[in-house]
Amino acid sequence: MVYAGIVAGGTGSRMGADMPKQFLKIKGEEIILRCVKRFLEVAEIELIYIAVHPDWLAFTDELFSNALNKTDLDRIRTVTGGKDRNASVFRIIEAIEAQGSLSEDDILLTHDAVRPFVSGATIRENISCAQKYTVCTTAVPATDTILFSENNQTISNTLVRAGLWHAQTPQSFKIKAILRAYEQLNDQQRSKLTDVCGIFTAAGEEIRIVGGDVSNIKLTTPFDLKLAEAILG
């Protein structure tokens, strides 16, 4: 089976709003709702799990109950998110496991709730790539020069742009593969990891790149909201 996992556990402190950024509206519709609808449009995805901060779980359930029809609601599950991104992903995996035994071919696409412009083509390419190569991540080639500073005051190095990519989501993988990869890591390794790609990299697994789209932006700041409004026209 193919599952989607929407990570929506953040509190949105950088947005400066009175609610997490994923619940803010652009053009009259909540960001998280726009995001989930993109995955609902992909028939290959059987179920969509949404990991939410416990304080906003009831709000999320009510939002989707009011906005979606029964057919779409039957494909959605909400779970309590963890203390960080990876913890939320594993909460989603635990919920999937609770539904029944996993097969080697079961796939999970993890995605930021605040990336509402992901395309159906990108989602489908993630599915195909994960089915063939086990793990993949969406990314776009870096177009800006990237600078590195050891002290955050002076430039230590200018990185060669060729070969650098900006990570996006979805990040997609076979579920049993990530469980095996995570088992290989010690507590110190696990504590330093910020996303699922880090888990596979630390375990020595090869990660394929799915070419993303520059419009698949992450809405993090008030300026990003203005940009999103402009994209929608």
Image (cartoon, rainbow, N blue to C red):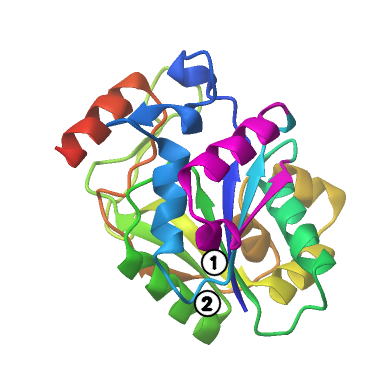
Could you tell me the amino acid type at mark 1? Ser
For the image shown, how many numbered marks are present on the structure?
Answer: 2
Q: Are marks 2 and 1 in contact (CB under 8 Å)?
A: yes
Q: What is the magenta range?
A: 55-81
Q: Position of residue 197 (x, y in %)?
A: 58, 59
Distance of label 2 from label 1 (alpha carbons):
6 Å
Residue 117, which numbered label?
A: none
Up-down relation of residue 119 to residue 154 (above or below): below
Residue visible at 45% across and 43% down in the picture: 33
Report the front residue among 183 and 86.
Answer: 86
Could you tell me the amino acid type at mark 2? Ala
Residue visible at 54% across and 25% down in the picture: 20
User: Is residue 71 highlighted in magenta?
Assistant: yes
Residue visible at 30% across and 51% down in the picture: 160
Q: Is residue 138 visible?
A: yes
Of the image marks 2 and 1, the number of the one nearer the N terminus: 2
Which secondary structure, mark 2?
helix
User: Which residue is disc 1 drawn over?
Assistant: 172
User: Which residue is disc 2 drawn over?
Assistant: 130
Q: Residue furthest left?
A: 233
Residue visible at 43% across and 27% down in the picture: 24
Q: Position of residue 54 (x, y in %)?
A: 74, 32
59 lies left or right of 230:
right
